[in-house]
Image (spheres, rainbow, N blue to C red):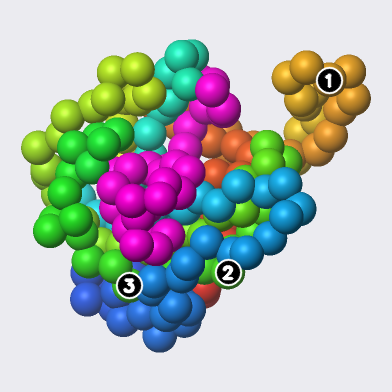
Amino acid sequence: MSDLQLEAWMINREMLPYRLHSRLEHHLCDLPPEQDDGYYPASVLILFTWNEDRWNILYTQRTEKVRDHKGQVSFPGGAWEEEDLCLKDTALRETLEEIGIPSSEISILGSLPSRQTVTGYYIVPYIGLLDWPQETHLQENEVESLFLIPVDWLADETKREDREFTTPGSVSTRKALFYKEYAGHTLWGITANLTVQILDLLK
């Protein structure tokens, strides 16, 4: 990334929330879709936080004990439950359960379009702001760690590449987006795709 491109990504503290809010969807309380195509409703929460004089995105490293996406980098979130009024509440509930941050600490700005995953979920990604640092409590069976990655690092296209991988339980291979390793973590797949999607809105 050139110095000029890097400067473009050093978005000041006030500008990023304005940009995101103006470019996101604002159906903030979507109900799970009535569908019978085998995809289960879920939602995730992409949290931006200002730390060390620049914007960062919060990620979690999943444990090997979870049912899906074992050991992968992800956003807080999970499957819809009947107690949830809508999918936004699913994302907020799961964030509290997984990393201990309550909804009172989060400002929701909007959402990205829903999408289906290869693992059988229909997910709605919500975007929020979070002050940092926060007191956190990790759900030890689900979350191994949480960490921040600076937005300017994520925006550097030289940090990304397409790789082939084999789906667990399958002999076939497919291509997916991978980021280079950051502080011992490898961001790839749906989480990497959503990251690039939200960064594209900021251009």
Badge 3 vs badge 2, beta-carbon distance below 8 Å: no
Using residue 105 as the reference point, say whether residue 191 is left or right of it: right
- Give the label on residue 113, or none: 2
Q: Amino acid at mark 1?
A: Ser
* Residue 115 seen in the current view: yes
Using residue 191 as the reference point, say whether residue 163 is left or right of it: right
For label 1, the residue is 170
Mark 2 neighbour density, 10 Å: few (under 14) some (14–19) many (20 or more) = few
Residue 87: say if magenta. yes
Horizontal and vertical percent position of residue 107 = 22, 66
Looking at the rendering, the stretch of residues picked out in magenta corresponds to: 67-95
x 42%, y 80%: residue: 26
Mark 3 → mark 1, Cα distance in angstroms: 38 Å
x 73%, y 55%: residue: 36
Horizontal and vertical percent position of residue 135 = 9, 37
Relative depth, front residue between 97 and 183: 97
Badge 3 vs badge 1, beta-carbon distance below 8 Å: no
x 39%, y 63%: residue: 86
